[in-house]
Image (cartoon, grey):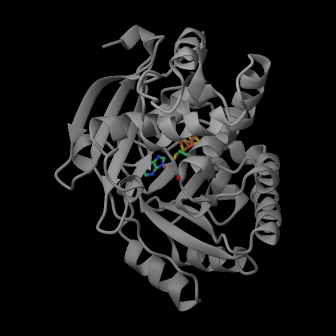
Amino acid sequence: MNGILNCTIDELEKIFLNNGFSKYRAKQIFVWLYRFGSRTFDEMTNISKNMRDELTKMFYIYRPKVANVAHSRDGTIKFLFQLADLNTIETVFMPETKRNTICISTQVGCTVGCKFCNTGYNGFVRNLTTEEIISQFLAVKDYLHLWDTATERLSNIVYMGMGEPLFNYENVLKSMQNLMCDENEGISRRRITLSTSGIAPVIERLAKDLPCRLAISLHAPNDNIRSKIMPINNVYNIESILNACRTYSYYHKYLKITFEYLLLKDINDTDDCAHELIALLKNINAKVNLIQFNPWKGCSFTPSKKAQRFSAILQKAGLEAPIRARRGIDIMAACGQLQSHGREERI
Ligand code: SAH
Ligand code: SF4
């Protein structure tokens, strides 16, 4: 049996045509799956009984198991989802006044191994499938009963959970296609942000395939510092990333690129670093997001106390540079703190 959430609308149309069903049924089914959150084909009342029975034989509608839910004092909710093979992933729901954002994972673990990141420290297990990526969004809506209300209730998605999205490109792309899909009044590309450690050639592919908001985990103003904290910089250095960003901006001028900058005490938080960063981003349609380091056991970095000062220097030079609010600290749901629990640590 196939997981129907693994299919794009084009793929579903082809399958339907090959099985003697009308092509337009695919669009109707997408509405049921993504706008109403259907978990069975039986409830799809505008589809004939005969076709619903066939669909039930051909497809399943995937949801992960909710293994744990943690509520933070600030309203953030962290979900631990268990996948069919017993691996687990984390997804974070962050309510705000005007929007609600969900932070989703793309891999079990991560291969990139950034020195400050707990996910990277725990190693890599596997890529998530398309349905495992998408179903984090659907399962959170199930759990919080967000189906009856306007889609604005879960309005923004950030691909900023566990894993490097551009190392699982095909599945991430398909998941975004389905979540953005017009047929089911999907989420606008301006409300989806993909965060990457800077896989330059894939950033250029994304610019052509399916643009969305882009966030680059830069974290340093030069290669020397960046390579020390992000070994991937030895493969894709700052210049190659910025060139890819220029291509991205050339095609999509309206999508300002965010550069994430994690402030680490005495590593990248000096005034000189701020000035170097300003020079680096001079010709790019950029904004900087300053991130406070979230410590975790086993990591030797110290949070910087210079965030305000660093931000002021950038802003004086005309660069937007807010300090990102830390969400869900008390439940270990903040950036870089998400964990994967491999099979051997199953719950
Ligand atoms: N792999 C992607 C997306 C997931 S990481 C990427 O690296 O961009 C999401 C963000 O969390 C990245 O900007 C990452 O650098 C940041 N991050 C990782 N560890 C962190 C920590 N301990 N404290 C604060 N931010 C961290
Ligand atoms: Fe992977 Fe992102 Fe963590 Fe780096 S910061 S190890 S790329 S998840």
- Locate the N terminus and report the quarter of the image it occupies: top right
Tell me which residue sits at (64%, 48%) in the image: 197
Instruction: Where is residue 111? Give x, y as percent.
Output: 62, 30
Q: Quadrant of ligand 2?
A: top right
Instruction: Where is residue 44? Give x, y as percent.
Output: 46, 29
Instruction: Where is residue 252? Give x, y as percent.
Output: 75, 68
Please tell me in which quadrant of the rendered image residue 24 appears. Answer: top right
Question: Considering only vertical position in the picture, is 295 above or below 12?
Answer: below
Question: Considering only vertical position in the picture, is 64 above or below 26?
Answer: above
Question: Considering only vertical position in the picture, is 298 above or below 56?
Answer: below
- In the displayed structure, does residue 234 sit left or right of residue 91? right
Looking at the picture, tell me which residue is in the foreground, 239 or 192: 192
Let me know if residue 190 appears in the view. yes
Of all residues, the one furthest to the left in this rendering is 73
Looking at the picture, tell me which residue is in the foreground, 70 or 237: 70
Tell me which residue sits at (40%, 65%) in the image: 324
Instruction: Where is residue 169? Give x, y as percent.
Output: 71, 37
